[in-house]
Amino acid sequence: MDFKDLKNKSIKELQDLLSEKREEVRELRFKASENQLKKVREIRNNKKIVAQILTLLNAKNKK
């Protein structure tokens, strides 16, 4: 997901996506700890998306 795509979403959509991505990160961490995850980089990518969403939410809330 690109940052440009995230910019076009509403606050409600961003909050829904944020909770979804946080849940994904949680599940991926559990899988990684049990050695069931092949692509460990997915954790980093999802954490990056979470940070981008939080940045956009903070920027939109300040307006």
Image (cartoon, rainbow, N blue to C red):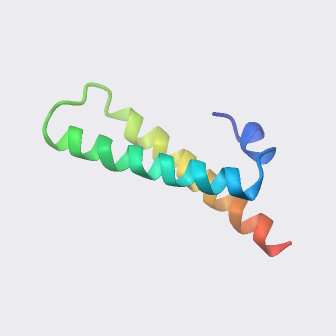
Q: Residue at x 44, y 52 (%)?
A: 22
Q: Residue at x 81, y 44 (%)?
A: 8
Determine whether 24 is above or below 16 in the image: above
Between 33 and 16, the one nearer to me in the picture: 16
Residue 17, image x and y in percent?
Answer: 58, 48
Q: Classify residue 20 as left or right of residue 15.
A: left
Residue 50, image x and y in percent?
Answer: 54, 52
Please identify the quadrant where the C terminus is shown: bottom right
Residue 31, image x and y in percent?
Answer: 22, 38
Q: Residue furthest top?
A: 38
Q: Residue furthest left?
A: 34
Residue 9, image x and y in percent?
Answer: 76, 46
Q: Residue at x 71, y 41 (%)?
A: 3
Which quadrant of the structure image shows residue 4? Answer: top right
Q: Residue furthest right?
A: 63
Determine whether 28 is above or below 54 in the image: above
Circle count: 0
Which quadrant of the structure image shows residue 33? Answer: top left
Please identify the quadrant where the N terminus is shown: top right
Q: Classify residue 40 as left or right of residue 32.
A: right
